[in-house]
Image (cartoon, rainbow, N blue to C red):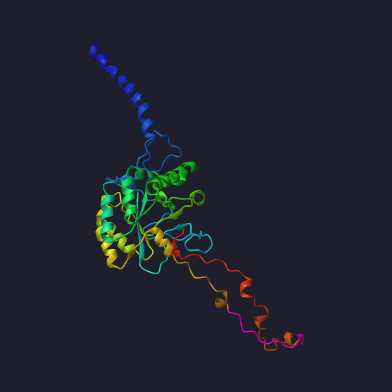
Amino acid sequence: MKPEVKAIRGFPALLAAALLSATVIVPACAQTLTPSGTAPSAPPTSTFTAPHPALMTGPVPSSMMEPPPPNLPSSTGMAAPAAEATGTNPHNLIAYSSATVDGPYIAMTFDDGPNPETTPRLLKMLEQRGIKATFFVLGSRAVASPNIIKQMIAQGHEVANHSWDHPQLPKIPVAAADKQIGDTNAAIEQITGLKIHNLRPPYGAMTPALRAHLREKFGSTFIYWSVDPLDWKDRNAQVIHDRILKNVHPGAIILSHDIHPTTVDAMPKTLDDLIAKGYKFVTVSQLIAMNKAMPEPKVASLNPAPKKKPKPQGTAAAANTTGSTGTKPATTATAKPVSAKPTAAPRPPASVGLY
């Protein structure tokens, strides 16, 4: 047999060996990728997690355009679950997606920044119009751009917590969630000198148990939204403008992301058109301070007790009050005082959107 024939027959073996060695290397990297944007439950420090589309500044691949986790706010707002309040104080609620206000007040909120390329441009637009907004910042980006955070405060904006690097908090260990929130609070407080209590969970993802834990540990108030233009998904300034104008309402908390150029591009016309409609802009904390609770029900007015009549003389007269006509006896003898039966605290209005 000629040497070249032997070489050809030996080639498949070499190719198989090469493929075998490749299969040992590639999965080691592939296993650390999470295209859905969810963080591993206990990721090692050296792993790489693919960013969620909301954090991507470039075009979003169609394969990554996934809906938010279930039961999260949408562009049409959230239904209000059972009330989670301390007493009936409208300013001491655990969570808000909007507020009930006596006027055309709204809160513009911007997530995931600061971005040194887009956020300063947005800050200039807001300053030109005298508008105050709330920025839910990532701790990792705040420490990278502290001067932008200081500029926000100097212009009268509110800075709040959006976690350190945007994981779904219920999908990581509680200790890791504590670190996400605690480190971000500490970073913002170090830059601004202000205590931070307002928290927007990434994706709006939260569980009752984790919410109660973070509330107890950090005193967090959870801020969601009632208007979502999906600006992270549809990078189109006109679409963003139209969705906000279509769904805005008094007491609305409007969600958007200042890390996207298209969102910032949408703001001049959006803000001007909102102003033209008579809306006034406040921070989230200012909106919460305006929130109105439903009026306390008055039992006496809802179920008025009949006027008392003179009590008949003797038991016989009392026993014959029904007579042959079958009329019912007066109810004054069994009517309870107004304070005898406590009433349940009223549920907040649906627009408060407790979550």
Image position, residue 131 (x, y; %) = 31, 60
**Main secondary structure of the magenta stretch:** loop
Image position, residue 150 (x, y; %) = 33, 49
Query: Is any atom of residue 236 visible in this view?
Result: no
The stretch drawn in magenta includes residue 57: no
Which residue is rendered at x = 46% and y = 55% of the image? 221
Picture quadrant where residue 130 is located: bottom left
Q: Nearer the viewer, residue 64 or 18?
A: 64
Image quarter where the N terminus lies is top left
Picture quadrant where residue 270 is located: bottom left
Image position, residue 177 (x, y; %) = 46, 44
Q: Nearer the viewer, residue 265 or 60?
A: 265
Q: How many marks?
A: 0
Q: Nearer the viewer, residue 60 or 54?
A: 54
The stretch drawn in magenta includes residue 309: yes
Range drawn in magenta: 304-315
Query: Is any atom of residue 104 visible in this view?
Result: yes
Q: Is residue 328 left or right of residue 266?
A: right
Image position, residue 299 (x, y; %) = 57, 74
Q: Is residue 337 left or right of residue 247?
A: right
Q: Is residue 230 above or below residue 344?
A: above
Q: Is residue 186 above or below residue 242?
A: above
Q: Is residue 174 above or below residue 280?
A: above
